[in-house]
Image (cartoon, rainbow, N blue to C red):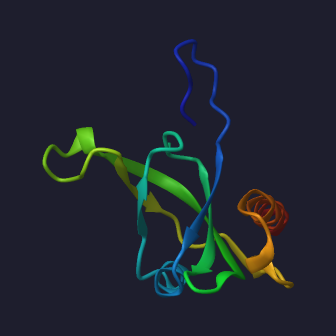
Amino acid sequence: MEGNALGIPRTPRWWVRRIGPRWLEAIFSGRKPWELRRTDAGRFRPGDWLVLTEWIADFGYTGQWVVVRIRDVVEADDVPGGLEAGYALLIVSRPLACGWLGGDRAALPDDETRHQYLEAAQAGLG
């Protein structure tokens, strides 16, 4: 686990992000061991948890989710001319937990929905 300047271990961060059905299935099956993400909400780090929640544009959240661990991060500075600034390529583990939240997620505000997915993912790992 990575530490800060004083050598104190950093607590892994939990990220909850939307993903389309095609890409969720590819992550779930292991055919896609990576994820390209914008870095506008913060910096992804190896060891962080990523909860991917299925999202369909004309519908909303479907209830499907999967948890992966970020194994490595490639940022734009690491590959000059290879990645657009503001994006990171996340190398992820195979799914460590998955599930489905019943009910109508499409009608819930994003923050509340993300919180419910996060709770379900943490319970799925425990």
Number of numbered discs on residues? 0
Query: Residue 34: x and y, percent?
Result: 41, 66
Horizontal side, residue 92 vs residue 118: left or right:
left
Horizontal side, residue 73 vs residue 123: left or right:
left
In the image, residue 86 above or below residue 100: above
Q: Residue at x 52, y 40 (%)?
A: 42
Residue situated in front as seen by the camera: 63 or 110: 110
Query: Residue 63: x and y, percent?
Result: 74, 81
Residue situated in front as seen by the camera: 110 or 95: 110
Residue situated in front as seen by the camera: 56 or 88: 56
Query: Residue 14: x and y, percent?
Result: 67, 50
Q: Residue at x 43, y 58 (%)?
A: 37
Q: Quadrant of residue 117?
A: bottom right
Q: Residue at x 76, y 64 (%)?
A: 109
Query: Residue 87: x and y, percent?
Result: 35, 51
In the image, residue 113 above or below residue 42: below
Residue situated in front as seen by the camera: 19 or 14: 19
Q: Quadrant of the C terminus?
A: bottom right
